[in-house]
Amino acid sequence: MTHIEKPRVHHPALEQNELGLTRRDYEGRMSTLCAGCGHDSVTAAIIETFWKLSVPPHRVAKLSGIGCSAKTPTYFVKEAHGFNAVHGRMPSLVTGGNAANRDLVYIGISGDGDSLSIGLGQLCHAIRRNVDMLYVLENNGVYGLTKGQFSASADVGSVAKTGEVNRQRPIDPVLLALSLGASFVARGFSGDKAQLVPILEAGLRHRGLALVDVISPCVTFNDHEGSTKSYRYTREHEVEAVEADFVPLRRELTAEYEAGDVREVAMHDGSVVRFRKVPAHYDPTDRDAAYAYVRGRQEAGEVPTGLLHLDPTGQDMHRALGTVETPLVDLPFEALCPGRDKLAEILAAFR
Amino acid sequence: MRPTDVSDPQYFHRVVDCQWACPAHTNVPEYIRLIAAGRYTEAYMLNRKSNVFPGILGRTCDRPCEPACRRTRIDGEPVAICRLKRVAADLRGEVDGLLPAIPDEKNGRRIACVGAGPASLTVANDLLPLGYQVTIFEKLQRPGGLMWTNIPEFRLPGRVLWEEIDHILDMGVDLRLGAPVQSLAGLLEGDMGGPFKAVFLGSGAPKGKELELPGRHDTDRIHIGIEWLEAVRFGHVDTVGDRVLVIGVGNTAMDCCRTAMRLGASDVKVMARKSREHFKASPWELEDAEGEGVQIVENHAPSRYLVEDGKLVGMDFELATWHPGPDGRLKKETHGSTTIPCDEVILAIGQDNAFPWIERDIGIEFGEWDMPVVDRTTFQTTRPGVFAGGDAAWGPENIIWAVEHGHQAAISIHSYCEGRPLDERPSYGQNLISEKMGLHEWSYSNDYDEAERARMRYADLERRRAHLDLEAELGFDYDQTLQEVERCLNCDVQTYFTRELCIECDACVDVCPLSCLTITADGPEVELRGRLTVPALNLDEPLYVSDDLPQTGRLMIKDEDLCIHCGLCAERCPTAAWDMRRSDLLIPYAGLDAGEARPARGMPAEVA
């Protein structure tokens, strides 16, 4: 941590978004994570994403569980609604919040401990319900807050800082999400914002759960020789499976690429994800093909990154439940709770 | 791009905008920190090392440092550097024992200086500690040059002026007052004592410019500004007419109009040919004059003096506006004329040099404007052994330039006497010292203070008008000083990058409040500047470029322009690839290598 707050003074030429805000207006408090933590770069990418999409800060709900990752929401969009949940229970709180007020923009921040150990069931059910949210999983392969024990995402053969070698098979959040039928699955790296920001933008605009697994090195306990989640290892083994551009609704589409090189997928709100350099025999909109591709690359010792699977046709929780368009919090009490006579009427219908 | 070579002392020097802009390269941030720590005497002595007259300059400097101050680019107003210098001078303790020791045994070399102004005094200041004997010839009855005759006492109190001049005279200057040099040939031939190994011309630009218009010589109520100020200083003039016109709008004009207010004039107008954006006077001097009730009239070009029956009654002016012509120069457009009544006119439209006392056949070549040709590096004229500096060299500048000329001329004179080539200048050095004190602690005040620039306090206006010698500015009080020192961004505490340690985690890039940092691929500078985190459009400020980074081969690039030196990049760096290091520019002086200190008087002999 630092002993001064980041001074408010900023570069006079900072660009403003449609709301007249600069990136600095989307910041939060000063980080108290270790210097060099990947999570701080993820924070910076999230700030960039919200700024670029001109999201009104007070319309954001940011939630987290327990762990280093859980501290992250404090460091961005200070005007947002925030909730720090019990360990692993962030998905349930987002589900509840989203059920009550579907108009807010939900971002949940979790880690490999929070999501793949204690909260694994929560993650699975949030995917199953397809809650409309951006789910960022800051993945560093260790329990940093308790001094660097292996987490459930540690690779076989990965060496801990203490010298111990991991022998247990990891749970891979990308393969897990694909097998559960997630409609948006991506993997990024905290050290590559050029790739991460468009993924986060698309994830925020996706209607349904967008899972973004971000390799986010633990600079204190997992950035050494023998680690498979260090800055250096990730840079050496990362393979950008697809390059995805996010083109927001209001920006004009300009044809920069030859037809055939580019595959465009429309999102619910009319914005477009543009896939570039997709390898042969790999279709990011085909879940089985995505699974096979990611599995194959990982078996070959690579870390495939990019927007790996996108299914814009999936139904999010509200559509599946057939709820009204108006957020429940905005309905008059009489409509939400029509009273004893209405209940009697409904019950009578079952007799 | 080529990686930046920070082992060249001039790179980090350039980042310290104030020091870079100061002709004498005074270490401003360091003395401001000393003031912040209440160490006024040390702050004063640090100033004295480079600018020799801290108390005088703390009141009268033209402040090239302030427009350059990085703070101006951050919040619009520079740190009040000059006024802080005055704080150090006002609150310092005894410095006699800290002044340079003068050897009892002389080196047998005698040097003559012409004129006892700041340039000659600086030459003496630098050469006397080396054992030289310095004789200064001054035509007036007191030393100081224009510092005394032309800067009114309400801006520069006599006690401050004489004390700092005495610091030098007391080193053993052989001062000849009332001794004008009538013939340089004679001086060189030994008519005025000697023989002298070298001669330094520091005689200033003592001739005020004339404005020949009809009526100029029909009255005795028209004066040349600098002569009039001199007469006031001598006490020959102690009254002035009720309505005074000052012609010209430079700093001398400001001194003239404010002096006229104090001598009893009730209506003082400064008449400017052009509009305000073309004024030569420093903005703060204009502000001070207007604050004392002087009226500044723009776009009035003088055309004649009106004298009736031998009595000055007014002046005619053309009403003018100025527009750039096809060659880019301003062209006057006249829109009629006007008469402004007055009882006295003071001409302050510039100064000229005058060298009637230098023979043209003694090997000193004269060039443009009838000025001696002086080498910009060595300060030597075309006659070996004759040097020049201050206003005598290239026309009117200000005190701080004269001081720097004195330092450089002293280096040359020393080399000349030792038989070394003059154009081999001694090199600068630098010390780089980490300011890290603990995990998250620095030995300087790194937080950004949002305080606005402190406003000067002035003596009561009525009292100012009543007392010619009452200092107008009161200086900063304790609270103002405390506030102002914190505005300094400590630009000399440099962000120092060690490429080998960088793991490219982006922490520094993300935390930088001024968006100075970028990690990106190499490219030509112009193109690179355009794709930084925020495009680097101020080409006056350098980019700090690393060599290839270990993991990706990209470059770490810092735009120095708006860095507030808060140290957050270094605090958030997990590997200490960024560090905050204080760069101390080591400046060579006559007989001293860069960084070497002169033994002080108060030092015991064995230490000295």
Image: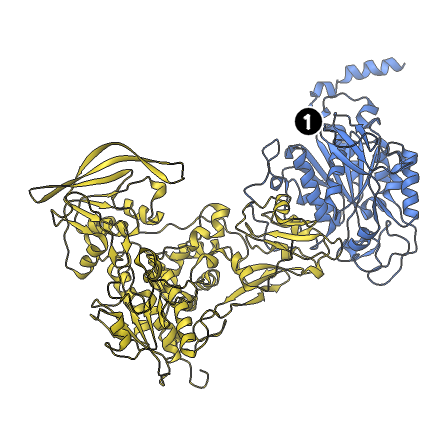
Q: Give the quarter of the figure containing the C terminus of chain B.
A: bottom left
In the picture, measured across the screen, residue B562 lies left or right of residue B280, that is: right
- Which chain can be seen in blue? A
The image's colour scheme reads: by chain
In the picture, measured across the screen, residue B503 lies left or right of residue B155, that is: right
Q: Quadrant of residue B47?
A: bottom left
* Mark 1, residue position: A250
The relative height of residue B85 versus residue A174 in the rendered view (above or below) is: below
The relative height of residue B260 versus residue B197 in the rendered view (above or below) is: above
Label 1, residues with CA under 10 Å away: few <14, some 14-19, many ≥20: few
The residue located at (67%, 56%) in the rendering is B573
How many numbered callouts? Answer: 1
Chain at tag 1: A
| Rendered shade, chain B | yellow
Q: Which of A111 and B20 is in front in this view?
A: B20
Residue A67 percent location from the top left of the image: 76, 49
Q: Which residue is at the far front? A: B361
Residue A267 percent location from the top left of the image: 78, 27
Residue B24 percent location from the top left of the image: 42, 63
Task: Tell me the amino acid under the disc marked 1.
Answer: Arg
Q: Which of A38 and A180 is in front in this view?
A: A38
Residue B9 percent location from the top left of the image: 55, 64
Q: Quadrant of residue B388?
A: bottom left
The residue located at (71%, 38%) in the rendering is A62
Q: Nearer the viewer, residue A331 or B97?
A: B97
The reply to whether residue B273 is visible in this rendering is yes
Badge 1 element? loop
The relative height of residue B267 versus residue B415 in the rendered view (above or below) is: above
The residue located at (70%, 21%) in the rendering is A333
Q: Nearer the viewer, residue B491 or B377?
A: B377
The reply to whether residue B94 is visible in this rendering is no
